[in-house]
Amino acid sequence: MDAQEQVNKAISALTSFEVSDDQRNERSAMTLLALLGLQSGDSWDKSTNPLLGTRAIMDRIRDEYKVEYKPNTRETIRRFTLHQFVIAGICEENADQPDRPINSPHWNYRITPDALHVFQTFGTPKFDTLVSAFLSTHPSYKSLTEERKNMPKTPVTLPNGQHLNLSPSGQSTLIKAIVEEMLPRFAPGSEIAFIDDTDHKHGVIDSTLLDRLGITIQARAKAPDVIAWDSNHQWLFLMEAASSHGPVDVTRKNELHELFAGQWDKVVLVSCFPTRKIMQKYLALIAWETEAWCEDTPDHMMHFNGSRFMGPYGNPTD
């Protein structure tokens, strides 16, 4: 059996598990094979479920299937393959340490024991029966997305003219306002590097820009809702859509400092609210040296102390 035949079998197996169209591809198939520890000539009853980080998964794909992904592809594998595997119950995170910090370099994945038992029977008469039993207790990712496919989406136009359809609920309406109303007023010409959509359909908008800025968002890291780069001022906007959860408070500011330590001298932190009335509930929590913006008064930015109206502050000792 050559490598391509094994990849095709993996796509077939994933199809049986009712993954969505976005996971029925060679990237997801090779990710699955790496997680199962299968080489091109192995039979599926040899499947195992070792603990593997994203880098180790990519290394196995390179060594066995001769496909070398660029470093910034890690985010694509996380958000468009591993994330969906986890939701579907095919894969689990940090089985060795469930409380592992979200920004830990030791974050890992493994095939769940239930799914492993099914994959080990692939190609045998037992497989279809076991897949059906698995899906009766683990809703497939495809079934979860089908529930939302007929709901109206939130259309967003990026500064470069690209159009996105974000999730129909959650923070999407406020994210749309951030991109279309706030940024053109206060950071004209900026580029959108990242949007954390509720469904994670558009988690990475510009992986090349993220790579150029030296930004790596760890799996399940509490990334900002919107990341934008203002090349004119060399400012990195980290924006939180605080419509239902809190703003950039002291705790959140420290979390973002850990995630963006390498870019902190360029960072501008903005808490974004739908209305001033909602913002009033959080006024006492908003961290100093950050900004606040309200969708209902889009021409105004509220500045919380500091030596200038708006801009990066760097580290406290700078």
Image (cartoon, helix red, strand yellow):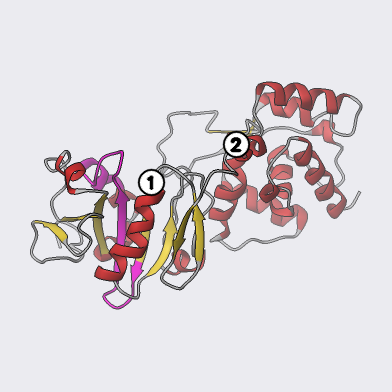
Q: Residue at x 70, y 48 (%)?
A: 21
* Quadrant housing residue 265: bottom left
Q: Mark 1 packing: few (<14 Cα in 10 Å), some, or many (20+)?
A: many
- Per the image, the residue denoted by label 2 is 147
Q: Which residues are magenta?
A: 229-255
Q: Position of residue 201 (x, y in %)?
A: 54, 51
Query: Can residue 52 be spotted in the picture?
Result: no
- Identity of the amino acid at label 2? Glu
Q: Position of residue 195 (x, y in %)?
A: 43, 55
- Identity of the amino acid at label 1? Gln
Q: Is residue 253 magenta?
A: yes
Question: What label does residue 171 carry, if any?
Answer: 1
Q: Position of residue 152 (x, y in %)?
A: 52, 47
**Which residue is outermost to the bottom?**
232
User: Is 109 in front, or is 128?
Assistant: 128
Q: Is residue 142 magenta?
A: no
